[in-house]
Image (cartoon, grey):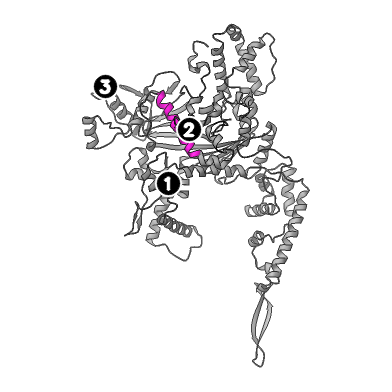
């Protein structure tokens, strides 16, 4: 379910300010750094030398001087934009505007692989902002490929004790499991860089999170056909103003709102894509491992002689290209190579061809906005009272015809403050501090009852936490918050599911059946509510005698004879009284079936205004048709839970190719000693290490 995480460790090079901190540093050796644990990692990343590690730094400035400062103090001050006399080479970028020249440190980018991981971890260092950023693909880090999903695997303790087939169960446990994965990731990190202390979660920002789901089909054809139907469904919550909505041959991608991106794509096509796919990386690892495997074998010379041909055969087989088997190659060598591939790319490509992947990406801006609107002080009466006042003033300001009240200065000040609060970006932190979570629940710290003044401040700024986190509003990454994000993906998945319908001529039958039922409902309503159409009038004759007459009421110039005539169009449709004219639907239905047009293409072709076109779509909905089931003529077997995933991975034959190491089927995300840990089951086949093969290749 979790795909990608971007974590930022703040406070890497900021120092504490004040005489007390300075004295503690001089007398007691207490670090001046805002977050010493992150500073240690910061120094290691810049200066680490060793295998499994790469870092790119363009050198554009050199300073050579003498100083009494130690290297750590100098390095910190230098990368914090304070000049000191030492020798150091850093990546700088120069900005020239008129006569003003300014310089900034440019990010250093790199990657590393801990021995227990299957995938590189990409990181970047931003000296000016004072953070180190890690980009982690969770499934690739654990399993080496993202055909696997971040759920308890088939024989894990959690899977045995609870039913993780359903979304609700996974959603319930996802927050705990994700934090346990992050714990294990940082344990791997400090072990790799030989650091004594774990990062401080209070200063770790979740900058982005991607949530995904793999939907399995019976065949590649079914998956691609299903995707073709999905392309014709109107894009839900798509931004009208966005310039780019990508619908490619094997994918759909669009933004649902600022900072949220949703896409559906064919996993098999993505796997062999040279830009985003993992096939080229898997192929390289396979080649290196086979060199290692045959190095001490009697068949090493035979393998080395035919290595390129064997690997080319495997590549063509994976890509589905035709190839001729070379009779000069020993079949025994080929078979042994195939059996010992770390990544069976033929198997992975074949299985990925049967998968459509749904993926939603939440960036920091969207995450903070969701938390503020959905979770921040949701049950606090004071906060909710100010939210209602804000909405009332906003409605008045946006209304073309102003409401019958003028906001007071007090109300307008509240509006400005709440508008600024709700519409500014911020940070999501992994902090588990109790007072911080209380702050996001209760308004007592921001409300003055005597003046009724309510101003929301940044917790990190109020308590002088330091670092970049002080500059914007911070929110916690809570259990309910993550469950909401997971359920947002589930809603989009359900929206894009295709239903089976009857053949084309069933449209007229549907309309006839619906109209018959609508007329019956309307007649019953008119009979029961006939009294609403009559009125009694008081009159006098020529002699002054009073008499009463009963007559039908009038609405405008129209005499009302049926109660349904008093209803609006929207009420008629809502109550199911509105009949459908089949000619209004046939043209759209014909264009879908015969011209193979999408909903958006039909709208442009018919040159209908948005209200006219939406009314026709509502008519389809009234008769039981929708964009999802309008164009399907074949029953496609699939589901939207995890039953298919578990049924496949519980097969021993499937496990051999799916899991790089057999014990992977017990992977969970539990990190305590009494349970299975993530790092217990990493792939180290015969102690193979890809980066130690320079002498063997």
Q: Is residue 72 left or right of residue 160?
A: left
The image shows residue 479 at horizontal and vertical percentages of 47, 42
Residue 176 magenta: yes
Specify the quadrant that holds the N terminus.
top right
Per the rendering, the mark at residue 9 is none
Residue 192, by quadrant, is top left
Instruction: Tell which of 403 and 676 is nearer to you.
Output: 676
Q: How many marks?
A: 3
From the image, give the main secondary structure of the stretch colored magenta: helix
Dot 3 surroundings within 10 Å: few (below 14), some, or many (20 or more)? few
Reading the chain from its start, which is encountered first: label 1 or label 3? Answer: 3
Closer to us: mark 2 or mark 3? Answer: 2
| Label 1, label 3: how far apart the Cα atoms are | 44 Å
Instruction: Look at mark 2 in the image and give the residue it sits on.
Output: 670
Question: Left or right of 570: which side holds 211?
Answer: left
Q: Give the image location of residue 191, x and y in percent.
A: 41, 24
Q: Is residue 255 in view from this perspective? A: no
Checking the image for residue 424, the label placed there is 1
Whether label 1 touches label 2, CB < 8 Å: no
Q: Position of residue 345 (x, y in %)?
A: 61, 23
Tag shown at residue 65: 3
Along the polypeptide, which appears first: circle 1 or circle 2?
Answer: 1
User: Is 582 located above or below residue 57 in the figure?
Assistant: below
- Residue 412 makes an appearance in the image: yes
Magenta-drawn segment: 174-193
Residue ID at (45%, 33%): 182
Q: Nearer the viewer, mark 1 or mark 3?
A: 1
Q: Helix, strand, or loop for circle 2?
A: loop
Which residue is painted at 31% across and 42% down in the image? Answer: 464
The residue lying toward the viewer, choosing from 341 and 209, is 341
Q: Secondary structure at mark 3?
A: loop
Say if the magenta span includes residue 331.
no
């Amino acid at each position: 379910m979790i795909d990608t995480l971007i974590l930022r460790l703040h406070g890497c090079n900021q120092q504490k300010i004040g005489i007390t901190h300075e004295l503690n540093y001089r007398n007691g050796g207490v670090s001046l750094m805002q977050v010493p644990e992150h500073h240690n990692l910061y120094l290691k990343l810049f200066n680490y030398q060793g295998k499994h590690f790469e870092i790119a730094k363009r050198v554009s400035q050199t300073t050579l001087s003498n100083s009494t400062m130690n290297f750590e103090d100098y390095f910190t001050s230098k990368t914090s934009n304070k000049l000191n006399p030492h020798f150091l080479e850093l990546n700088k970028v120069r900005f020239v505007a008129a006569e003003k020249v300014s310089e900034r440190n440019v990010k250093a980018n790199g990657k590393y692989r801990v021995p227990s991981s299957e995938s590189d971890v990409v990181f970047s260092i931003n000296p000016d902002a004072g953070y180190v950023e890690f980009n982690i693909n969770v499934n690739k880090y654990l399993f080496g490929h993202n055909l696997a999903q971040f759920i308890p695997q088939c024989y894990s303790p959690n899977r045995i004790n609870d039913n993780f087939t359903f979304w609700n169960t996974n959603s319930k446990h996802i927050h705990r499991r994700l934090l346990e994965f992050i714990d294990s990731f940082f344990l791997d990190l400090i072990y790799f860089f030989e650091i004594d202390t774990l990062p401080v979660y209070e200063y770790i920002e979740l900058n982005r999170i991607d949530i995904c789901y793999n939907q399995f089909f019976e065949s590649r054809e079914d998956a691609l056909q299903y995707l073709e139907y999905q392309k014709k469904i109107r894009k839900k919550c798509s931004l009208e103003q966005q310039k780019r909505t990508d619908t490619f041959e094997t994918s759909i991608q669009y933004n649902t709102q600022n900072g949220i991106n949703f896409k559906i794509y064919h996993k098999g096509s993505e796997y062999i894509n040279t830009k985003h796919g993992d096939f080229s990386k898997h192929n390289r690892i396979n080649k290196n491992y086979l060199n290692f495997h045959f190095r001490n074998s009697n068949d090493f010379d035979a393998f080395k002689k035919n290595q390129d041909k064997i690997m080319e055969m495997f590549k063509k087989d994976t890509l589905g290209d035709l190839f001729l088997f070379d009779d000069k190659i020993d079949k025994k060598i080929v078979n042994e190579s195939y059996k010992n591939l770390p990544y069976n790319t033929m198997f992975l490509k074949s299985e990925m061809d049967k998968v459509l992947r749904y993926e939603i990406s939440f960036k920091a801006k969207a995450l903070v906005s969701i938390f503020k609107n959905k979770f921040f002080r949701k049950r606090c009466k004071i906060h909710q009272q100010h939210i209602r006042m804000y909405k009332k003033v906003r409605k008045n300001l946006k209304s073309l015809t102003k409401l019958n009240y003028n906001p007071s200065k007090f109300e307008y000040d509240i509006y400005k403050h709440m508008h600024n609060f709700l519409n500014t970006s911020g940070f999501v932190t992994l902090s588990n501090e109790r007072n911080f979570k209380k702050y996001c629940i209760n308004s007592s710290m921001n409300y003055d009852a005597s003046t009724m003044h309510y101003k929301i401040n940044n917790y990190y700024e109020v308590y002088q936490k330091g670092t970049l986190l002080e500059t914007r509003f911070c929110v916690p990454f809570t259990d309910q918050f993550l469950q909401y994000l997971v359920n947002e993906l589930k809603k989009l998945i359900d929206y894009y599911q295709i239903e089976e319908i009857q053949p084309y001529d069933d449209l007229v039958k549907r309309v006839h059946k619906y109209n018959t039922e609508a007329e019956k409902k309307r007649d019953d309503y008119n009979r029961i509510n006939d009294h609403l159409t009559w009125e009694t009038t008081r009159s006098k004759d020529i002699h002054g005698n009073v008499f009463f007459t009963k007559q039908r009421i009038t609405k405008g110039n129209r005499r009302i004879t049926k109660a349904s005539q008093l209803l609006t169009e929207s009420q008629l449709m809502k109550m199911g009284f509105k009949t459908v004219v089949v000619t209004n639907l046939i043209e759209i239905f014909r264009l879908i079936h015969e011209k193979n047009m999408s909903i958006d293409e039909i709208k442009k072709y018919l040159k209908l205004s948005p209200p006219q076109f939406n009314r026709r779509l509502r008519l389809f909905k009234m008769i039981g048709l929708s964009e999802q089931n309008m164009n399907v003529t074949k029953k496609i077997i699939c589901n939207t839970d995890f039953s298919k995933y578990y049924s496949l991975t519980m097969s021993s034959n499937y496990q051999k190719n799916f899991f790089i190491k057999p014990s992977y089927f017990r992977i969970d995300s539990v990190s305590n000693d009494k349970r299975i840990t993530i790092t217990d089951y990493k792939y180290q086949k015969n102690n193979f290490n890809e980066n130690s093969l320079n002498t063997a290749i």
